[in-house]
Amino acid sequence: MNIILEIEKILSDLGYENAKVTVSNRPDLGDYQFNGAFNLARVYHKSPVMIANEIVEKLKDNKNFKNVTNANGFVNLTLSDEFLVNYMNEVNNNFDINTYKIDTDETIFLDYGGANVAKALHAGHLRSPNIGEALKRLCEAVGYKTISDVHFGDWGRPMGLIICEIKHRYPELDFFNPNLDNYPKESPVSLEDLYDIYPLASTKAKEDESYMEEAREFTRKLQNKEKGIYELYEAFTSIAIDDIKDIYHMLNATFDLYEGERDADEYIPELLDYFKKGNYTQISDGATIIDVKEETDKKEMPPVILIKSNGGVLYDTTELATLYSRIKRFDAQKYFYLTDIRQELHFVQAFRAAYKTNLVSKDISLEWFGFGTMNGPDGKPFKTRDGGVMPLRKLIDLVKDETRKVIKDNIKEEDKDELAYKLAIAAIKYADLLPNRTSDYVFDPVKFSDINGKTGTYLLYSTVRMKSLLNKCEIEYKKYHKISSTYERNIIMNIINLRNTLEKSFASRSLNEICEYLYRLTSSFNALYSNCEVLTEKDAETKESLLVLTKLVYETNKYLLDILAIDVPDKI
């Protein structure tokens, strides 16, 4: 049962459509509240107090409520113990009835990750795989099918720059001989060298026009898939992609597709032909563009540039070609894109162009979600102590050093490293998902590893404690009998609000609601654990009831932590 929907249905039966009931922000007054009587008063020409009295009168004999009061037009509703006990038993028998499900056969395509294969993953790359993976799992949890793609930055000028620098360093490589039939499969440069090459080559190109021209020529050869050049590209990108996959795997981020800009490249001619035949483009200063301005724009909206005056294609072209290929190959009804919030203009332009040109139909939803940055204590992008960019592997190791400190001494030494790693990933992911998605936040490895704070470490430690408690009990716990304390009631109210939390989280396409809920639920359990003897409780019915609650909190935590892509260890 969704108690909020039940109350809202009763209000609808009274003639008050679209009336919204919320979880009370004053638990001392009630479990739920209805503050809409004042708005309804203007519509129905009644006083707020009169409307509130009608609601109280309608609900006063309802056995689901212990108390329904009118406080000067504000309706406060308190659930009855009978209802709470019965509902806990229903959830104990079928966990799914307390979750949020949408009856749909639709598919959501999610584009996140987006790493550039020319650059080592650093702290700034953390948010996209974290948020994207959790949002994907949330979509699946509420009933959607999903397809996910990492969409690598693996084409264009950056690749040409790398090839140019490799040619300068190793001109004798077989890759630069177009007359061979076979080329080496192994990369001629190591991963470390590769990640050093791109920034160096980029700097050289800015300072030396002849070097830039040479890089442009290699880019052209790559895009034409010339012999040797394309094989060199495949060799060095393969080791970079393997490295990125490995780090994403550490973060529990997995994808159905590991495609990139190179995969969209073959669709560009077909896309441009589609735009041309539909008369969707125009020429401006020698460039081929799509005008995406709208009358309601309050500031200038630049056009989408498909082809530059020199014949080159741009990021927008590749983006639209990627979407074009996805529309052709997959049957998805929604497309979710997750990137740094600074890319907002790019996606506004791309989506407008897609709809304006009928590349996608109006019944297909294109949604972009931007996120803020993860910063260091100085409010600037997280750095190493010497001021360099913090590699993502090093960030994980940094947090692992902190989480290792909270592991109990009785854990075998050979198990401590794996456990510290799981705790570190939990600390990192929870800290990253806890703030509002669009907000910047300060990353503090010590604070985020605190076993007593609002942290992933705290959640795992508490969840493992619940499992340990259940493993130690020597009785069956099949029935919840009675509420014996306010600690139990607080837990029950938190459990009941799971469905509402999932619904709000999916509606906002954000994970902070789930993170906050996890902390509230876990804290309510820890309050009970600190004040009630579970295993040594003398009264049999009370003991069984406490164990049922422990089981339900544990199952809820496991369910939500899995959505956040956080693994729960067996012990800490």
Image (cartoon, grey):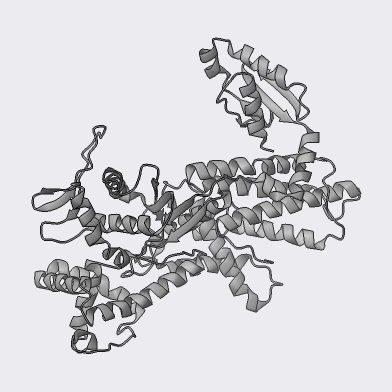
When asked about the image quadrant of residue 115, the answer is bottom left
Image point (38%, 67%), residue name: 121
Q: Is residue 277 visible in the rendered structure shown here?
A: yes
Q: Which part of the image, by quadrant, shows the N terminus?
A: top right
Instruction: In this rendered view, identify the residue nearer to me: 67 or 500.
Output: 500
Residue 542, image x and y in percent?
86, 46
Q: How many marks?
A: 0
Q: Residue at x 63, y 11 (%)?
A: 50
- Give me the residue at 75% from left, 30% from top: 64
**Which of 411 and 364 lies nearest the eye of the viewer?**
364
Q: Is residue 98 left or right of residue 475?
A: left
Looking at the picture, does residue 540 appear above or below residue 43? below
In this view, the residue in front, 335 or 521, is 335
Q: Position of residue 249 (x, y in %)?
A: 49, 68
Q: Residue furthest front?
A: 277
- Tell me where residue 243 appears, x and y as whole percent: 41, 74
- The residue that appears at 62% across and 15% down in the rendered structure is 51
> In the rendered view, does 171 fall on the left or right side of 416?
left
Q: Is residue 451 among the parts visible in the rendering? A: no
Q: In which quadrant will I find the C terminus?
A: bottom right
Q: Position of residue 266 (x, y in %)?
A: 27, 65
**Does residue 144 lie above or below 178 as drawn?**
above
Relative vertical location of residue 262 with respect to residue 145 in this rendering, above or below: below
